[in-house]
Image (cartoon, rainbow, N blue to C red):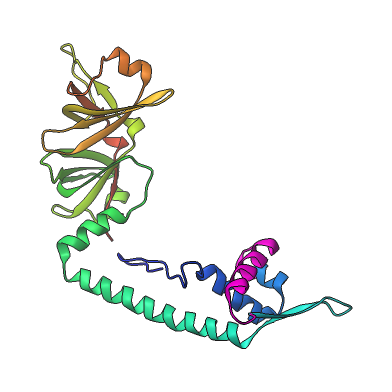
Amino acid sequence: MSAGLVSAELRLAGRLDARFFALLEAVDATGSITRAARTAGLSYKGAWLLLETAGNLATEPLLETQAGGAGGGGARLTPAARGLLEAWRTLQAEHREFLRAQDARLARLPALAGLLRRMSMKTTARNQFAGTVASLELGPVSATVTIALKSGDAITATMTAAAAKALKLKKGKEALALVKASAIVLVSDFAGWRLSARNQLAGTVSRIERGAVSSLVVLTLPGGAAVTASVTNEGVEALDLKVGGAATAVFKAYAVMVAAQA
């Protein structure tokens, strides 16, 4: 598995993967199915299942086993298994080199590489917005950063000054704004009131996914960005939210997490 932008799992015959070959290597190193299973992070039953499945498909035995006795049992790889393991090691090395070459190719396409880097972060935050730092107010204790989104909207976040320095934030730097759906409050009518929350993004309800207790409500902003809020079903009914209706996503600046490339 590559640690870069391109990743792929190597399998032989559609089923022999890294777990199987790690088990073969462990058998070769320990001379025992029991110890090999522990080394490879498998149960004894799971290890035998892998070995038996592969053995049933092979034209030659993959293991030579010796029954337990006073000195205990043992297992060793047959020449056929050693050949299979050697082929795996060769292919694995070539596979890693192929992935490195594709990463290098992507590096020559900065726009595509940037898109993939932004998409590579795995997080539970439902809302992830890509943009650039439009402004940064750095104080002795806290910092306020505004991220201009590609859609033309902007999101403001507050954090400690130490965090802003650790992220090396500066105007023009690419950054991601992450907001949990549960941190967003929807407002359908301000009734003349103003809210203290820094982020207030007006849009149109484009989708409502109703669950047993709560619903996910998606707003599409004028610039095309989508904001998802988690709202109780009672809240959806109380606000009379409907697809095509207007609503504003409201969330405080401290509810925004910021991510930036090192």
Eyeballing the image, is 172 above or below 27?
Answer: above
- Residue 72 versus residue 190 in the image, above or below: below
Residue at x 66%, y 72% (from the top left corner): 36
Q: Position of residue 16 (x, y in %)?
A: 51, 70
Q: Main secondary structure of the magenta part?
A: helix
> In the rendered view, does 213 fall on the left or right side of 187?
right
User: In the rendered image, which quarter is residue 107 located in?
Assistant: bottom left
* Residue sitting farthest toward the right: 70
Locate residue 246, reporting x and y percent.
17, 22
Which residue is at a point 30% across and 12% down the rendered structure image? 238
Horizontal relation, residue 242 to residue 172: left or right: right
Compare residues 60 and 49 and report the one nearer the observer: 60
Return the residue found at the far bottom: 79
On screen, residue 150 versus residue 163, left or right, reads left
Q: In the image, is residue 27 part of the stretch drawn in magenta? A: no
Residue at (35, 66) in percent of width and height: 7
Q: Is residue 46 magenta?
A: yes
Nearest the eye: 95 or 221: 95
Which segment is the magenta one? 39-61
Which quarter of the rendering shows the N terminus?
Answer: bottom left
Q: Nearer the viewer, residue 36 or 231?
A: 36
> Which residue is at a point 16% across and 50% down the rendered structure image?
132
Residue 145 location in percent, x, y?
20, 43
Q: 37 or 225, which lies in front?
A: 37
Left or right: 94, with 77 as reference point: left
Instruction: Pick the quarter of the image with the C terminus.
Output: bottom left
In the rendered image, which quarter is residue 126 located in? top left
Percent x, y of residue 245: 18, 21
Above or below: residue 46 compared with residue 237:
below
